Structure formats: C-alpha cells, structure tokens
Image (tube, rainbow, N blue to C red):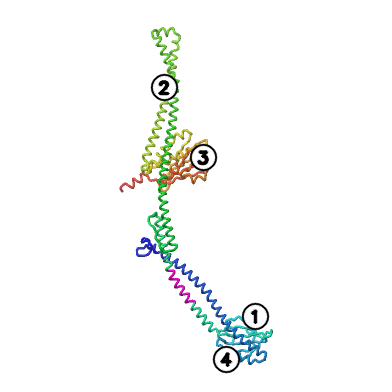
Amino acid sequence: MGRDASDTPSGENTPKPHRRRRRRILMRTIGMSWAMILLTVAVFLFALIPYQRQQLVAEMNQRAQVVYTSTAQVAMESVLLQDLSTVVDHCMSIVDQNPSLIYVVLTRSDGFSLLHTRRWWKQETLSGLWMPASRRTLGQGRFMTNPLGENEVFHISYRFEYMGVNWGWIHLGLSTNKFRLDSQSLYQRSVLIAALAISAGFILSLIYARRISVPILQLEAFARKIAVGDLSERIHIHSGDEMEQLAESFNFMVDELQRANAERQTTQKKLLDTARQAGMAETVINMLHNVGNVLNSVGVTTTTMKMRIEHSRIESLSQVASLLEEQKADLAGFFANDPRADHIPAYLSALGTHFKEERDTFISDLGTLERLVGHVRDIIHLQQDYSRASGMVESVGIRDVIEDALQLNSELSTQHKIQIATELEDLPDCWADRHKLMQILINLISNAQHALVAGDGEQKTMLIRLKRIPDNQIQIEVTDNGMGIEPENLTRIFQHGFTTRPNGHGFGLHSSAIAAREMGGTLTVSSRGNGHGATFILDLPYRPMEASDERRSPS
C-alpha cells in the first residue's frame, strides 16, 4: 500500500494527537473484530457442544437399546416357560460381558422385581422409580444417582409387553464414565478450537486494523489540508480495495474543487466588480437625479424671468421719452397747454414703482438661481470628494457623512414633502472607509425615499438614528413608514439582482451589504409587512481616533 511521506502515521516525528487517533482507530477496529470473533466462537460452541452432547446421549441410548433387545427376548422365552432362573442367568451374563452396564432390573406389574448387578442378584418387591406411570419417560435415559449404589448412572426404562399384556418393565443402568470422558474431550477440543480461532482472529484483526487505519489517517490528513484550502496535493493509496477507490474519489473531488474554486473566484471577482460599479452607478444616478431636480428648478426660474422680461413695461418708458423728445423745442408750453402733460408725472411715478418691484423680483430670482447653481456645485464637489476617498480608511465623522448623504438626497425629499428626523449621537471621529459608508447611506436613504413615494401614507416620515452599542460597535438605523417589505422578501432583499421597484436593478442593497461586510459590519432589515414601513440597520466596528491616539502616545 502506497502512501505520501507527509501522511505517514508512524515514526518519531508523528504528532501525539495523530498517534492517539491511530490507536483509537486500531482499538475500535480490533475491538469490533474481536467482538465478531467471540460472537462467532460463542455461537459455534453453543451450537456444537449441545449437539455433540446429544450425540453422546444418543449413543448411550443405542447401547441400552441393544441390551434391552437381548434381555427382552430371553425374558419372553422365560415367561413362556415360567423359568425365571434362565432370565437371571442371562441378565448376569449380560452384566458381566458389558463393562458399561451397571445393573439390569426386571419389574413385574405387581412390583415383583429381579435385580442384577456385577456382584449379585436378588429379588425384591419394588415401586416408585421402578414402576413408571408415564409412558413419556420410557425409552428416554436420564442421569441420576445410582439407586442401587453410590455412583452416577444413566438410567433408562423400557416397557415389557408380551402378547398384548403389560408384563412389566426392564430397567437398565449404564456407567457414565465413557460419557464423562467423551464430554471432557469434547470440551477440551472446543476450548482448543476457540483459543486457536481467537488467536488467529487477533493476529488477523491487527493486520486488518492496520490495513484500515493507515489509509483512514491518510485520508483524514488529506481532508484537513482540503479544509484549510490546500488543493495542491493529491493522495495515493494502492490497496486494491474500496480505500483506493475512495482515495481516487478524493482526488477527483479536489480536482473539481480546484476547478470550481477558480471559477468561483473569477465569478466572485466579476460579481464584486459589478456590484461595486452598480453601487457607484447608484450613487451617480442619485447625484444626477438631484442635479436634475435642481436644474428643473433653474429652468423654471429662468423661464419665469424670461416671461417677466417679455412682459416688462420698459416700452412705456420709451413712449414717454419719445413724447418728450418731440416736444423738446417747447417743453414749457407743452406742460402748460397740452393735457397729456398732466398725466406724465403720475405715470412716471407708477412706472418707477413698477420697475422697483420688477427689480426686486429679478434680484430674488437671481438669488434663487445662485442658490440652485451653488447646490449643484456642492453636490458635484461632494461626490468628487467621496469618489477620491474610495477604498481608503481615514478619519471620519459619522454625523458629517450622514448629513452629507441627506444633502445629496435632499431634492427628492423636498419634492415629495418627506419629513426627515435625525437622532444622531455626538461621537468622536473614527477610522472608517468614507466612500463605502457614503455609498451605503445613499442607497439606504434613496430606498427609503422611494418606499415613501410608493406608499399610501399621507404623512411621509423618515428617521435616521446613530448610536453607539456595546462591543465597540456603532449602529445606524434608517426607518421609514413607506410601503414596507413582504415577509417572504426579507431573506431576498440583499440578493444580487432582486428588486421590487419597476425601474430598479437590484444592485444597490446588494452592493451595500457587500460594502458593510468589507468594513467588518453587517446590514440587516426588519419590516412588519406591506404598508408598515421598514428599518435598515447598519452595524459597524467603531475605532475612535481618541483611543488610537492614546495607544500611540508614550506612557
């Protein structure tokens, strides 16, 4: 069986945990093998010994049957001849010739019995054991204490019938010495076979356990390398069994993982780039949307000023000037004699008042234009500032970023009369990625605004809350009372491409969730359902500048 040098589970350099795992595998495998061997041997012994014992008992029954047959034939003849001495002689002869036969007892139905042993015979009247009442006990031997002596005997009784008449019983007592010797030999052979089987099983289990444990440890070490992301190595096991197939499957799995990992990294990079571009696009779209709203106001103001200029009464002043120019040769006579001259002072006074009001209106409109153009400039400058800060961790005032995000989204709130409330805790500046934080906040505020616009509520409100929470974290909540989120969409809201807006693209929240994760935080959402608004919660690590300065300052 082949193995990689780095996976060798034995040797001085093997780590102790590795050796312990190997011992555990060996012990479990050996224990299981031993349990199977012991179970097999036990089943074998429990099945063999009773069977062999039954064979020995059957052998004794067979010997007794031979003696009974010979005795019954002589007994029949003696009964016919009324010659009991012949029966006695025959029985004594059988006992003398058969060393394993201890006694022969013939019992008549009235209890009269002839008792024959190797040393004596006699006649007595017997009962009890010698007159069995149940036929089930006839022909079935049993081990018992010798009723005619002290030693153990195998006692068996037979029914003696002659011409349909129950004459009595023939009882035989066989010696158990041979049975005991044969039983002892049976037990010894069984124990020897069991010991040999267990010893062979122990040796084979060691070989089998090592054959299993070594590849398992190799596979374990290989799996640990895979788990930590090392996909460069391969495992080689040449056992010719399932372990080799498993090793080949592991190698195939690693090849597929390596290929899938490369594809995943490529796809993830593309997806991350797409999400970032989408987040930037979302920010730019919001900026352009806000700029567009401001430019709409600029257009309205400019159109109003143009209409006022077109309808200005400046021509009336020209008419008065032309009239005076015509009468310049005799202005005194004109004012003294011409009735039109009487209306000129009042007309000029009214015209001056009108021009003053028109001037004030133009100044106001120009102020509005200046404010709107300044707003556009601020939006563009703010966007440029955050774009330059992309990917850089710097000193950030969280409140300032929130207020900037609100300013970038202010036109839509003004247009739809959205009431914005803030509860911003005064926190020291901290280290953070300003651009990613701005990207997340713009997306959250924009989504809240669209949810409010799409909602049915008359009073549209948004609450932005900033607070510090335990474990060096800050929490930013954006809550609205807009259209809300269906329960089945709460788990999908941050998925790439998922959106409930007709003109949405599903990138904003997805890119925000990615940005939050890159900043070491989380972005979550809660909603009670349709029409009940939603709350987005941004949790971020808080690293205040003051704490950093203290750590850097000398003690």
Q: Main secondary structure of the magenta part?
A: helix
Q: Could you tell me which secondary element the residue under label 1 belongs to?
A: helix
Q: CA distance from mark 3 to mark 2?
A: 46 Å
Residue 360's spot in the image, x, y percent?
A: 42, 23
Q: Which mark is residue 119?
A: 4
Q: Nearer the viewer, residue 1 or 71?
A: 1
Marks 3 and 4, how far apart at CA:
119 Å
Earlier in the chain: of badge 2 and badge 4, it is 4
Which of the two discs, 3 and 2, sits closer to the camera? Answer: 3
- Do the numbered discs 3 and 2 sit on residues whose CB atoms are within 8 Å? no
Of residues 296 and 161, the one nearer the viewer is 161
Residue type at numbered disc 4: Arg
* Residue type at numbered disc 2: Arg
Q: Which residues are magenta?
A: 190-206
Q: CA distance from mark 2 to mark 4?
A: 163 Å
Tell me the residue that label 2 is attached to: 359
Query: Looking at the image, which is closer to me, 254 or 355?
Result: 254
Q: Give the Cα distance between marks 1 and 3.
A: 98 Å
Residue drawn at x 58%, y 89% is 95
Nearer-N-terminus badge (1/4): 4
